Image (tube, rainbow, N blue to C red):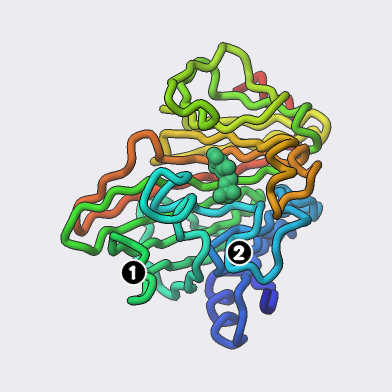
Amino acid sequence: MGQYAPVWDHKAAVELTKKLSGINQVTLRNPKGASVRVSLLGGQVTSWRNDRGEELLFSSSKAIPKSSKAARGGISVSFPQYGNSGSVEQHGFARNIIWTIEDDPPSLKSFDTQGQSFIDLLLKLSEDELKFSPHVFEFRLRVALASDGSLSLISRIRNINSKPFKFAFAYQTYFSVSNISEVRLEGLETLDYRDNLCPKELFTEQGDAITFETEVDRVYHRSPYCIAVLDHERKRTYLIKKEGLPDTVVWNPWQKKSKAMGDLGNEEYKHMLCVDGAAIEKPIILKPGKEWAGRVELVVVPSTLYSDDF
Ligand SMILES: O=P(O)(O)OC[C@H]1O[C@@H](O)[C@H](O)[C@@H](O)[C@@H]1O
């Protein structure tokens, strides 16, 4: 990885990036000391820390250095495809190529990040890269850190071709948890889901919060605006608030699959849980010239009492 540049706001980030050659990561901080690190490789969020310096996102100790792929952990975008159900690589190519910093992006209008520390990234395929993509688009990603430490990711995808563009999307988000067996997921009760371990059937979740005792790989449909991951041991609740993203992916590979993965430690599955705001079941169809937007806001509440208010 290249240089690590601490910056305080959007303009400073852009200036620093211009000054320093070879930079591929940018760090945003808020005045209380919370921070977010964003890599230009894949537009991936590789770290999110609270004002006590505690890491809130999981990252694998076996992530492969100098790899041309997004590291296992953090938050990366799956686009224009989720999984391997399409013509491009698993979870799409957006997470594996270099994004650029955009100086002056078009106004975000309805997604206000005023007063926040943010960085704007742009993915526009080069002639060479267009060979791998059947579509021509502009993908803008704003990563914003608020004064209360919450983290927002806003994606805008514009079809700049003369044909309609169909895609799936997910923010693959690895939350750091104390122990997966102690974690509870609330907000997906009674919803229909597709189980990727048994993909031909549609299942319906029971009325209880979800707990974890084995491998889980599901896409919940028409999920609510807010979902909560409760970590009792750490006395911490993650809230996932999403807009434009009707589905929610829940994934933990458990022991056997972890062992087969070259970039995840054998026991590390215990300390991660992926909960992704997504648009998968009904792919997005963008007409020429149109733009789609999908946003997640991740908030940390320092207790698990939130459960009662949820
Ligand atoms: O190893 P990858 O490509 O990052 O994918 C990891 C997992 O990502 C999840 O989103 C999928 O539901 C799983 O099926 C997949 O195994």
Q: Position of residue 162 (x, y in %)?
A: 16, 61
Query: How many C-alpha atoms fall within 10 Å of the one at disc 1: few (<14), some, or many (≥20)?
Result: few
Instruction: Using the rendered image of the protein, determine whether residue 202 is visible from the camera's viewpoint.
Output: yes
How busy is the neighbourhood of tag 2: few (under 14 within 10 Å), some, or many (20 plus)?
many
Name the side, left or right, on which 257 lies relative to 91: right
Mark 1 C-beta to ligand 1 under 8 Å: no
Q: Which of the image's four quarters has the C terminus?
A: top right
The amino acid type, in three-letter code, at marker 2 is Val
Residue that extends furthest to the front in the rendered view of this protein: 260
**Residue 199 percent location from the top left of the image:** 46, 28
Residue situated in front as seen by the camera: 32 or 277: 277
Residue 14, percent from left and from top: 53, 77
Q: Is residue 301 visible?
A: no
Asked where in the image residue 33 lies, by quadrant, the reply is: bottom right
Residue 174 coordinates in the image, percent (x, y):
64, 45
Residue kind at label 1, given as amino acid type: Lys
Which quadrant of the picture is home to ligand 1? top right
Q: Quadrant of the N terminus?
A: bottom right
Q: Quadrant of residue 266?
A: top right
Image disc number at residue 38:
2
Q: Which residue is mark 1?
A: 131
For marks 1 and 2, give the one nearer the viewer. 1
Residue at the (76%, 51%) spot, across then down: 55
Secondary structure beneath disc 2? strand
